[in-house]
């Protein structure tokens, strides 16, 4: 019986993905192989004689074939790292992206008391990555995650449960609510965070196949000009945001120019704009007028 060495399977997979013109071919092939074998990057690279079972080989070939068809790696492995934390993902959630870590950094710089009992609201929680990351950084905070999609809320609840050992009593400090934005909520929050749909409807067809074909359009489509969800949220925000609170919103490229007008129309004020690591304005901070 021929044995397939992991290093050989990896080499063949990289070639397959390169032929499919996938730019991250080497990284994707390695991540999928680590997933199938259940090993770390270090373990994979350290053992040249690592042998795959027939079942592992078949599973790996199937995953590589799906990646050739542009299904995202995170959906194939069911996991994506965000802020150093591994989060479960599904076809009903956006894949957490490094760009969104800009929001976490912006909030942490504004709300500096890590032991404060902040009340945190995440509008459009998806995987829960934004809310759960903040709750891990603020161990005395309480959080509410809102989403219109029941399947996404199930993923967020699963992620909260998986963080039990990492952050003090996180499942007892968070709840998830099915709602169209904040329609089902009452009370005020010290921190509000959101990555709402902001892609103009007509631009979705221009997105990468991994996004337009596999990620939920409900979490992408921001209406004709990309600002529909911001308009809906800003109308609700004055009654949700505490007097000294801060709200952080992810934005698309160039949207920092037009969002301030929507903010001010609702009696609020832009408190700052933060760039991502590529120098693109990615986060708009909002507070009550001072």
Image (cartoon, rainbow, N blue to C red):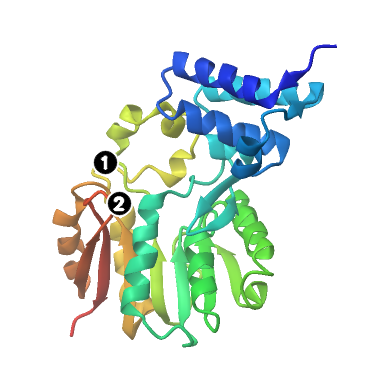
Q: Percent position (x, y) of residue 246? A: 32, 76
Instruction: Residue at 39% x, 58% y: name it.
Output: 101
Q: Is residue 279 above or below residue 176?
A: above
- Is mark 1 in CB contact (under 8 Å) with mark 2? yes
Badge 1 element: loop
- Viewer-closest of 223 and 127: 127
In the rendered structure, the answer to whether residue 223 lies left or right of residue 10 reads left
Instruction: Residue at 47% x, 81% y: name it.
Output: 119
Instruction: Residue at 49% x, 33% y: name it.
Output: 27
How would you rate the neighbour count of disc 1 (Cα within 10 Å): few for under 14, some for 14-19, many for 20 or more? few
In the rendered structure, the answer to whether residue 211 lies left or right of residue 280 reads right
Q: Percent position (x, y) of residue 73? A: 54, 35
**Structural distance between the alpha carbons of marks 1 and 2:** 8 Å
Residue 228 tag number: 2
Query: Can residue 146 be seen from the camera position used here?
Result: yes
Residue 224 tag number: 1
Q: Percent position (x, y) of residue 34? A: 64, 37
On the rendered image, what quadrant is the N terminus found in? Answer: top right
Instruction: Residue at 52% x, 21% y: name it.
Output: 14
Badge 2 element: helix
On the rendered image, what quadrant is the C terminus found in? Answer: bottom left
Residue 270 tag number: none
- Viewer-closest of 178 and 110: 110
For residue 175, which quarter of the picture? bottom right
Q: How many marks?
A: 2
In the rendered structure, the answer to whether residue 162 lies left or right of residue 248 reads right
Q: Is residue 181 above or below residue 266?
A: above
Q: Is residue 222 above or below residue 84?
A: above
Q: Percent position (x, y) of residue 169? A: 66, 77
For residue 177, which quarter of the picture? bottom right
How would you rate the neighbour count of disc 2 (Cα within 10 Å): few for under 14, some for 14-19, many for 20 or more? some
Query: Can residue 258 be seen from the camera position used here?
Result: no
């Amino acid at each position: 019986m021929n044995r397939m060495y992991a290093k050989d399977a990896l080499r063949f997979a990289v070639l397959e993905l390169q032929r499919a013109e996938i730019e991250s071919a080497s990284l994707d092939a390695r991540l999928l192989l680590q997933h199938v074998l259940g090993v770390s990057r270090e373990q994979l690279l350290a053992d040249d004689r690592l042998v795959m079972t027939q079942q592992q080989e078949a599973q790996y070939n199937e995953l590589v074939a799906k990646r050739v068809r542009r299904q995202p790696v995170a959906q194939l492995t069911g996991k994506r790292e965000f802020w150093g934390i591994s989060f479960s993902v599904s076809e009903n959630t956006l894949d957490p992206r490094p760009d969104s870590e800009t929001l976490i950094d912006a909030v942490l710089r504004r709300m500096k008391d890590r032991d404060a009992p902040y009340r945190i609201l995440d509008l459009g929680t998806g995987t829960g990555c934004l809310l759960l990351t903040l709750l891990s950084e603020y161990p005395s905070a309480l959080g509410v995650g809102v989403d219109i999609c029941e399947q996404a809320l199930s993923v967020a609840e699963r992620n909260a449960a998986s963080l039990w050992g990492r952050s003090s009593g996180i499942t007892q400090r968070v709840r998830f609510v099915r709602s169209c934005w904040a329609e089902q909520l009452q009370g005020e929050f010290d921190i509000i965070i959101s990555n709402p749909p902001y892609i103009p409807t007509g631009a979705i067809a221009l997105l990468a196949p991994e996004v337009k074909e596999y990620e939920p359009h409900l979490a992408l489509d921001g209406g004709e000009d990309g600002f529909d969800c911001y308009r809906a949220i800003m109308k609700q925000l004055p009654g949700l945001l505490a007097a000294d609170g801060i709200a952080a919103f992810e934005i698309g490229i160039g949207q920092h120019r037009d969002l301030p007008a929507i903010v001010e129309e609702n009696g609020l004020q832009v408190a700052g704009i933060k760039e991502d690591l590529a120098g693109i304005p990615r986060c708009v901070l909002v507070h009550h007028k001072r």
